[in-house]
Amino acid sequence: MPASDMEKTLSDYRQLLAKIEGRKGVANLAAYLEKHGLFKAPASTKYHLCFEGGLIIHQVGVTKLACKLRELLLPDTSEESVILCALYHDAHKVTDGYGHSTYDKNNTTTSEKQPYFWNTRQLNYSGGHKSALLISKFVDLTQDEVQAIAYHDGPYVPSWEDIKGDPYPLTLLVHYADMWSTWVVEKGRTKKYETTFLQDLKVELF
C-alpha cells in the first residue's frame, strides 16, 4: 500500500477518534491499542487485508460506512455509539488484552502460503466477545453497544444463535457495514454501487 494512502487512513482514524475521545475511557483504550500494534496488525491471517496495517484500513472503512448508514437507518442512535462500536469492533485482532498479540507473522519455510498465523498463546475466546471484553476494561459500554460489538460477525459464527431472535438495530448496522466493507469495498467492487446503493437500500427497507 502506498505510504500516502496509509497517511490518509491514519488521518481519517484520528478524525473519527476525536469525535468520541470525550467519552470516559476512550482515550485510554486508543492509547492501549496503539501501544500494542493497532497500526501494524493485519485484518486477517489470509483473507481480507492480510498485510501490515490492514486492520486499521478495515476499521476506518467500516466506521465511515456505519456513519452513513446511521444517517439513513438509525438517526436516533448517537454518532458516538456508532463510531465506538465500528471503530473498535475488531479490537481483538490487535491483542487479547492479556499481553498476547493476535497474529504471528509467517516467517517459516513451510508450505503454508498465508502471511499470518493465529497466535495460539492468546486467550481462547470468541473474537467479537473478546473485543467487547477488551473495550469494557476501559469504557463503560451500553447494552446495545455490548451486543453490537460481541455479535458483529452475525450468522457467520455459532454464537449468533444466542441472539438470532432479537438482534438489536445497532448490531445489524455494524454487521452490515463490516460485511459490505469486507466483501465489496476491500475487493474493489464499489464502482458498481457507490453512487446509489445507500439510497436503494433505504427504498428497499422502507
Image (spheres, grey):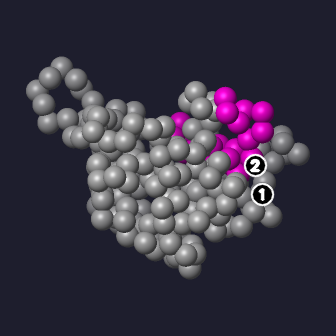
Indicate the amino acid at tag 2: Pro
- Residue at the disc numbered 2: 169
| Residue annotated with mark 1 | 74
Q: Position of residue 190 (x, y in %)?
A: 57, 43
Residue situated in front as seen by the camera: 151 or 196: 151
In front: label 2 or label 1: 2
Q: Is residue 188 magenta?
A: no
**Range shown magenta:** 161-183
Which badge, 2 or 1, is on the more N-terminal residue? 1
Query: Label 2 vs label 1: CA separation?
Result: 8 Å
Residue at position x 18%, y 20% in the image: 111
Q: How many marks?
A: 2
Q: Main secondary structure of the magenta part?
A: helix
Whether the residues at callouts 2 and 1 have beta carbons within 8 Å, the answer is: yes
Which residue is most to the right?
206
Q: Residues within 10 Å of mark 1 (few under 14, many from 20)?
A: some
Q: Specify whether residue 54 is in view.
A: no
Which residue is situated farthest in the top direction here?
A: 111
Crowd around label 2: few <14 · some 14–19 · many ≥20 (10 Å): some
Q: In this view, does 61 lie above or below 120?
A: below
- The residue sitting at 37% across, 61% down in the picture is 33
User: In the shown orientation, is residue 169 left or right of residue 187?
Assistant: right
